[in-house]
Amino acid sequence: MTSIEIKQGLTEEFSGIKYILTSGMRSRLLLAIYESPKNLEELRTELKKPSATILHGLKELENINLVRKVQKSYELTSNGFLLTVNMVKLIDNWYSLSKSKIFWNNHDLSGIPDELLKDIYLLKDAEYIHSTTSDLSNAFNTYINLLSTSEELRIIMPIYSENHLKHLIKLLNRKRLVKLELLVSEEIYDSIKENDLFNKKILQNKKVQIKCVKEELKIFLTYCKEFVSLSLFFNDGHYDDSQILIAKDENALKWALNIDRIYKEKEENYVKLQTGSSNFNEHLEH
């Protein structure tokens, strides 16, 4: 799906959701029967509104084929269910963005594929961690401590950072880290290769798989069974290691795995491949 198609889809979804969100009663009714059908008495108890108000809202939703009455209960139609699912996503996306608004407002989001921007709600339980004037390394140290808890890691690394790479070597040397997959740009790959230590300890390590893409990467993403971490670039192009999102739930892992699928759909972008663990993501998904 192209960026234009995604934006057109979002516009169509929004036009339908806008009609619902402009009425508190219409939106509350859809959410009330989203999980299961309810009769008038149940809706009156849950919404704490008089029957006349509820019936008026239900009639409006019936007229546009979002709700239907089956015997004495009201349920969503297929159209109603699809629209409510998207409305829930919109609410969750808004919550996710608001919860970590400093992180999202301060960074360049162009490195996140459009498909995943649409699914930011999957990161709603992520924790925003930032460095302070009294602890300039708080975000980085939190990230490094998390790395030491994992046996398998998948990292999209958009920068050449000797600090990061040396920490990965330490983990590989301790033998706790048994599988490491790195996705880097061609430029970053060449920089790693030119460094004798990194060439030997990372590129030639059988535990490590290196994938190299032609395009410039603008997202620093690490994920494994234990956690997902995300850091980005400032709008001026400089990488920001002082702010990070960290999540430890299945939704966040699902979001991260989708990035890998997007890159796999563009296999022609790969220019180099260091053999290693070939079933990393399949193992994570199970």
Image (spheres, grey):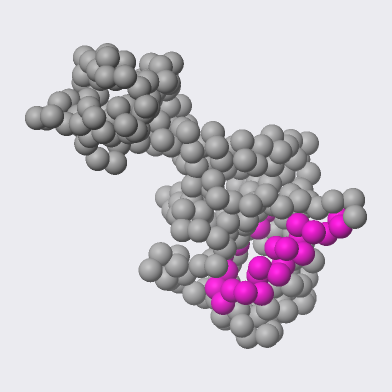
Look at 77% across and 76% down and name the residue there: 196
Say if the magenta span includes residue 154. yes
Q: Residue 79, position in %: x, y?
A: 24, 28
In this rendered view, identify the residue nearer to me: 222 or 128: 128
Which quadrant, please, contains the C terminus? Answer: bottom left
In this rendered view, identify the residue nearer to me: 42 or 149: 42
Look at 49% across and 47% down and name the residue there: 122
- Which of the 4 image quadrants contains residue 8? top left
Say if the magenta span includes residue 77. no
Residue 162, compared with residue 107, is above or below; it is: below
Look at 43% across and 37% down and name the residue there: 89
Residue 181, compared with residue 125, is above or below; it is: below
One can see residue 260 in this view: no
One can see residue 276 in this view: yes
Q: Which residues are magenta?
A: 135-158
Label total for image? 0
Q: Residue 3, position in %: x, y?
A: 47, 32
Which quadrant, please, contains the N terminus? Answer: top left
Q: Residue 136, position in %: x, y?
A: 86, 56
76 to the left or right of 158: left
38 to the left or right of 144: left
Look at 75% across and 40% down and name the residue there: 234
The extreme right residue here reads: 134
In this rendered view, identify the residue nearer to me: 279 or 71: 71
